[in-house]
């Protein structure tokens, strides 16, 4: 009687097919997960500016809004770069809307579409003194060229 010493070709092909199906589902989901985590870094860096901004507005007023990343660091003591965040700059000005814009590292193609943008905004709503994150500040939404795909925003930011 001959003893079986390995797998048959059919068994190996079935295992490879199962691995292929799992990879076809898992790789795109993992890629989206990585992009969402990169955006979460930018939102986290901007969220670290909330309290200093509210204190600054309370003492200096909204009309003296920071005009550059250097002023964010100097006036608010905030961090304006990260591993996946190229730069955080103030958005708005004397007339608003007030907030911050984070530019993500990489090219638009890295974010899935050559026409898609790669910025995310955290906006201070002066009417109710709350914060709102979105893929574009209202004044910039008409342009639409730099707005990050809403699929990559945290759940709290999706409108």
Image (tube, rainbow, N blue to C red):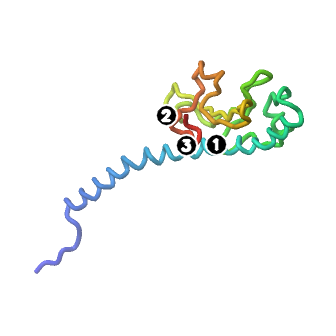
**Is residue 98 among what the camera can see?**
yes
**Residue 136 x/y as whole percent:** 61, 28
Q: Is residue 54 left or right of residue 32?
A: right
In the rendered image of this protein, does residue 40 appear above or below residue 89?
below
Question: Dot 1: few (<14), some (14–19), or many (≥20) neighbours within 10 Å?
Answer: some
- The residue labelled by disc 1 is 84
User: Which of the 4 image quadrants contains residue 66?
Assistant: top right
- The residue labelled by disc 2 is 112
In the rendered image of this protein, does residue 26 appear above or below residue 94?
below
Which quadrant: the C terminus?
A: top right
Question: Dot 3: few (<14), some (14–19), or many (≥20) neighbours within 10 Å?
Answer: few
Disc 2/disc 3 C-alpha distance (Å): 20 Å
**Residue 97 x/y as whole percent:** 72, 26
- State which tag comes first along the sequence, 3 or 1: 1
Q: Spot the residue most to the bottom.
A: 1
Tag 1's secondary structure?
loop
User: Which of the 4 image quadrants contains residue 122?
Assistant: top right
- Labels 3 & 1 near each other (Cβ < 8 A): no
Disc 1/disc 2 C-alpha distance (Å): 16 Å
Tag 2's secondary structure?
loop
Compare residues 13 and 112 and report the one nearer the observer: 112
């Amino acid at each position: 009687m001959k003893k079986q010493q390995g797998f048959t070709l059919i068994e190996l092909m079935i295992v490879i097919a199962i691995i292929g199906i799992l990879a076809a589902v898992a790789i795109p989901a993992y890629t989206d997960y990585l992009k969402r985590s990169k955006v979460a870094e930018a939102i986290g860096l901007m969220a670290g500016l909330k309290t200093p901004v509210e204190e600054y507005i309370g003492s200096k007023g909204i009309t003296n809004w920071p005009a550059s990343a250097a002023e964010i660091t100097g006036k608010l003591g905030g961090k304006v770069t990260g591993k996946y965040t190229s730069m955080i700059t103030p958005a708005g000005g004397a007339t608003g809307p007030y907030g911050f814009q984070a530019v993500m590292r990489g090219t638009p193609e890295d974010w899935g579409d050559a026409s898609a943008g790669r910025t995310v905004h955290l906006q201070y709503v002066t009417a109710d003194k709350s914060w709102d994150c979105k893929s574009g500040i209202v004044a910039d939404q008409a342009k639409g060229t730099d707005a990050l795909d809403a699929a990559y925003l945290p759940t709290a930011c999706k409108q």
